[in-house]
Every structure is written in structure tokens, then in C-alpha cells.
Image: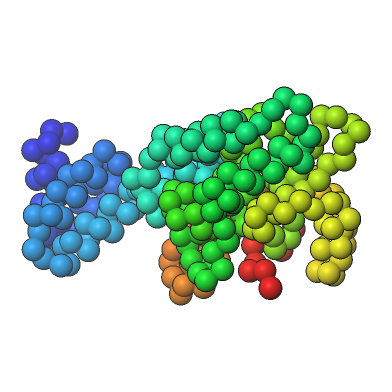
């Protein structure tokens, strides 16, 4: 369709008798029509028409997001930054993936200047901790723990406040760019990281980013799990996939919208989560007690 035809089509939304058919036609055109809808919104003085246009724009953006999430899943879900950016774009469709990458790269460079080839793993972690938690002062957002903003990577990078998962994601993304053997761990109620040294003489250990990079032993994790009255499970100690991390981030976002009394948004995020869980065997799925709860 030409630009003139598209604008003429959008103008027909003013007619209530044919508006439903016109809306269906517009939605079939996909996200490329969004700039025309935004232009019509700016030109309209009718609040009802503006609301119709806003709903159309959101539906088109949400359909596009679902398609991109399926592509990410089908590609193996290996790119964690892209997966978190896709989640980010639910609330902020204009979020810039390249800008997120640049922010992570700046943090990587600052840590790299502190690292030496002969460093012990614990000292490497302390270098990460110094840059993230002392220089840039990343910390737990305890005052607004259930805010959806805590799941939005670009906002966490800007405000330096997040939940256990997003703080760990930033830490993990920086560590990956430094080729450090750090991975996510699906611990119930508190997402943590694990350092799995290549040197077999050094035992794996854990990193609690919600507590400024506190190093934990396996015994500490076992004690934590016992306090939750849960049976021991290898999932609580072993690295999880990037797909697992984004699933958990979506569960956190669903919970945030529920706490904020926004059931429609929670339901939509549930649809995004379903895209990443439809292919999961129930016997392989992580325990459902893995939403990040506020620490006491």
C-alpha cells in the first residue's frame, strides 16, 4: 500500500460501523504501519480515537515482540543480552540493544583494567565487585522491590538499582565478555551466580549480587535451601541456561504487574513466558518457587 492509501485506511477508524474490519486490516499490515498510527494520534483531537490508536499500536508491538521472542528461542536462546532486551521492549519498545551492549562493554573495560592473568578466581570476583558495587554503586532496590522497573535492564543500568536477577544478569554479561567461567544458578527465591574454575584444585563457589557480590560456599547454599524446607536438588547448585534466566525474568515481571494491580499486563507477560515454556518437559522444568522474593 502507498502512504496515501495507508492514511486513508487509518482515517476509516472514525466510522464505528466498519472500525472492527479496518482494525483487522491494519493489524495484518504489521509493525511497519506504526509510524502512520503515531502520526494520526498526534493529529487527532478525539480522546476515543486516540485510545483506539494506542491500542492498535500496542497490539502491533506485542505481536512483533512475540515473533522476535520465538526467533530468539528457536535460535537456542544463547544471547542473554538479546533475551533481556526483548523482555525490556515489552514496556519500552524503543529500547536500544546497541546502547545496552555499549553500557555492558564500558563496565567490562573497567574490570579488565584491574585483572591480571595470574589472579585467583576469588580476586577476579573482587575486581568485578569493586567496579560494579563500589565504583558504580549497583545495589538492591529494596524500597521498590516489586516495581516492574527492576526487570528492565536499561533502567537498572541507568538507576543502578535492581532485583537479584537483573543485578546478576549485568554481572554475568560483564563476566562473559571477560571470558570468566561464571554462570547463573536457579536458586529458589534468590537468583545467584556460580564461578566454576577451570583449575580442579579450586572449588566452585557462588556469588550473591543482591548482597554486593558476597561469596558463598556450597555449604552456604545447602544451609539456605534447608532453611526453605526444600529437598536438595542439583538445579540449586548447577549452572542454568540463558533460556532459564529469561524465563525467570518473565516470571518476576508477571509478579510485579500482579503486585501493581495490573492484571492485563501480567497476562500478556504470561503469553511471552508461554513462548519460552511450551517446549519444556514438565520433568525438566525448574521448580516453580523461583521467583525472586525480597530478602528479609
- In the picture, measured across the screen, residue 140 lies left or right of residue 204, that is left
- In the picture, measured across the screen, residue 5 lies left or right of residue 201, that is left
Nearest the camera: 2 or 83?
A: 83
Determine the residue positioned at 47% across, 62% down. Answer: 148
Determine the residue positioned at 41% across, 34% down. Answer: 98
How has the structure been colored for display? rainbow
Nearest the camera: 26 or 199?
A: 199
Determine the residue positioned at 73% across, 34% down. Answer: 181
Q: Which residue lies furthest to the top in this view?
A: 117
Q: Can residue 59 be seen in this view?
A: yes
Q: Where is residue 112 in the image (x, y as percent from the top left)?
A: 60, 31
**Where's the C terminus, which quadrant?**
bottom right
Position of residue 6 relative to residue 167, above or below, is above
Position of residue 231 relative to residue 213, above or below, is below
Q: Where is residue 87 in the image (x, y as percent from the top left)?
A: 48, 49
Q: Is residue 284 visible?
A: no
Q: Position of residue 141 (x, y in %)?
A: 54, 64
Nearest the camera: 223 or 84?
A: 223
- In the picture, measured across the screen, residue 64 lies left or right of residue 161, that is left
Amino acid at each position: 500500500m502507498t502512504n496515501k492509501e495507508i492514511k486513508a485506511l487509518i482515517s476509516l477508524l472514525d466510522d464505528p460501523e466498519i472500525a472492527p474490519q479496518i482494525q483487522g486490516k491494519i493489524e495484518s499490515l504489521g509493525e511497519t504501519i506504526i509510524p502512520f498510527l503515531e502520526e494520526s494520534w498526534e493529529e487527532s483531537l478525539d480522546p476515543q480515537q486516540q485510545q483506539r490508536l494506542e491500542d492498535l499500536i500496542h497490539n502491533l508491538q506485542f505481536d512483533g515482540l512475540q515473533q522476535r521472542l520465538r526467533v530468539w528461542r528457536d535460535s537456542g536462546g544463547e544471547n542473554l543480552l538479546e533475551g533481556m532486551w526483548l523482555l525490556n521492549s515489552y514496556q519500552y519498545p524503543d529500547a536500544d540493544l546497541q546502547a545496552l551492549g555499549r553500557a555492558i562493554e564500558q563496565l567490562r573495560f573497567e574490570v579488565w583494567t584491574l585483572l591480571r592473568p595470574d589472579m585467583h578466581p576469588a580476586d577476579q570476583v573482587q575486581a568485578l565487585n569493586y567496579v560494579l558495587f563500589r565504583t558504580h554503586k549497583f545495589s538492591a532496590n529494596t524500597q521498590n522491590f516489586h516495581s516492574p522497573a527492576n526487570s528492565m535492564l536499561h533502567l537498572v543500568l541507568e538507576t543502578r538499582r535492581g532485583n537479584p536477577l537483573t543485578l546478576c544478569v549485568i554481572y554475568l554479561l560483564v563476566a562473559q565478555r571477560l571470558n570468566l567461567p561464571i554462570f547463573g544458578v536457579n536458586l529458589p527465591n534468590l537468583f545467584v551466580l556460580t564461578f566454576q574454575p577451570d583449575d580442579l584444585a579450586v572449588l566452585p563457589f557462588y556469588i550473591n549480587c543482591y548482597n554486593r557480590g558476597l561469596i558463598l560456599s556450597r555449604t552456604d547454599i545447602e544451609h539456605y535451601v534447608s532453611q526453605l524446607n526444600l529437598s536438595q536438588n542439583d538445579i540449586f547448585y548447577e549452572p542454568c541456561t540463558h533460556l532459564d534466566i529469561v524465563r525467570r525474568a518473565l516470571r518476576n515481571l508477571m509478579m510485579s504487574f500482579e503486585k501493581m494491580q495490573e492484571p492485563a499486563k501480567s497476562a500478556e507477560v504470561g503469553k511471552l513466558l508461554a513462548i519460552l515454556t511450551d517446549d519444556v518437559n514438565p520433568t525438566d522444568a525448574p521448580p516453580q518457587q523461583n521467583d525472586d522474593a525480597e530478602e528479609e
